[in-house]
Amino acid sequence: MKNTLFFSIFFLLIFQVIDANNLRIVSSINASWKFSRNDYPNALNENFNDASWELVSIPHTWNREDADDEIPGYYRGIGWYRRMIIIPAEREGKQVYISFDGVNQETEIFVNGKPVGKHDGGYTRFCLDITGFVKFGKTNLIAVKVNNRYNANIPPLSADFTFFGGIYRDVNLIFTAKQHISTTFYASSGIFITTPTVSDKEADVNIKTLVVNNDSLPAKVRVENCILSPSGIQINTTSILTSIRPNSTVPVEQKKLKIETPSLWSPDSPSLYKVVTRIYEAKTNRLLDEMIGGNYENQHRQF
């Protein structure tokens, strides 16, 4: 029975990278990590010698052979990952974020020897602002300390699967303009969509966007949302101006965007609408950020 309107609103890194306008850039850093399944207090330092460490790619776990080898038990403890990265000089002025899709289960992240954040939990994504720690046009060290020890404060405490340790999902660097759609609100897309009323005749769509201003000066931006039909036709576009204080985030809400006679989702007719969210500089109308519902997998850059 057709009774639900579905939108492709899974915006966790679901967007289109547009190089021509030098907008949001997402770079995979899954390759070429050095790894050791031991604890090294100095592994966060740039001059630490990791020449003897194993070369691995993400996704990775140090427990992958524990189920097959003849050694009893499996390792629950500390492992270190290190990767050297040159951040292009032309990206200076952008905000830089590092995003982890999954690390099991206690994580500490260091950039160029400095602690930038921690995360507890093996099954939730997290994203950190590392702009103030990177050196543009130079080599940067990203070091990650991971611990999959038993911790009574981190669920789940027991399960019918093994608590494999390591960086077991993708790692990306995200570059944005100073004014952009938030990346750090629980590592969400920063875009939240609801459909409070839906019928065969009409549907209402509410969209809330978290807009960030990382500049030391106030900013005025225009937030635009465009709804595309399942066939890709633009059916509703609305925009709103908003002012943002320096170094702050504001929620921008657009309510009751109408869809007449919507194509309702059902197993026999799985219609999907898309929402395109854009942030413009109000004075110049320069496009600052854009996120589009869709499959981003083939739009990543390898770093």
Image (tube, rainbow, N blue to C red):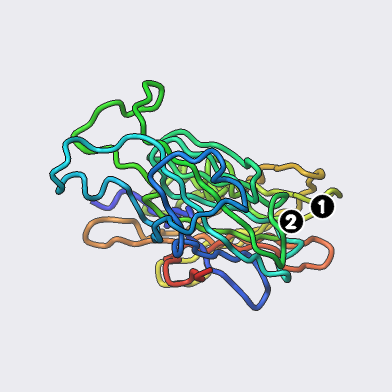
Label 1 to label 2, Cα distance in Å?
10 Å
The label number, if any, that marks residue 252 in the structure image: none
Identify the residue shown where x is 73% and y is 49%. Answer: 132
Name the N-terminal-most of marks 1 and 2: 2
Q: Foreground residue, 167 or 34? A: 34
The label number, if any, that marks residue 219 in the structure image: 1
**Left or right, residue 243 beside residue 87:** right
Q: Foreground residue, 204 or 132? A: 132
Identify the residue shown where x is 61% and y is 47%. Answer: 45
- Return the residue found at the far top: 152
Residue 30 percent location from the top left of the image: 45, 61
Residue 159 percent location from the top left of the image: 22, 31
Label 2 sits on what residue type?
A: Lys
Identify the residue shown where x is 34% and y is 56%. Answer: 264
What SS does tag 1 mark? strand
**Res. 255 in view:** no
Residue 201 percent location from the top left of the image: 41, 54
Label 1 sits on what residue type?
A: Ala
Residue 147 percent location from the top left of the image: 41, 36
**Res. 133 in view:** yes
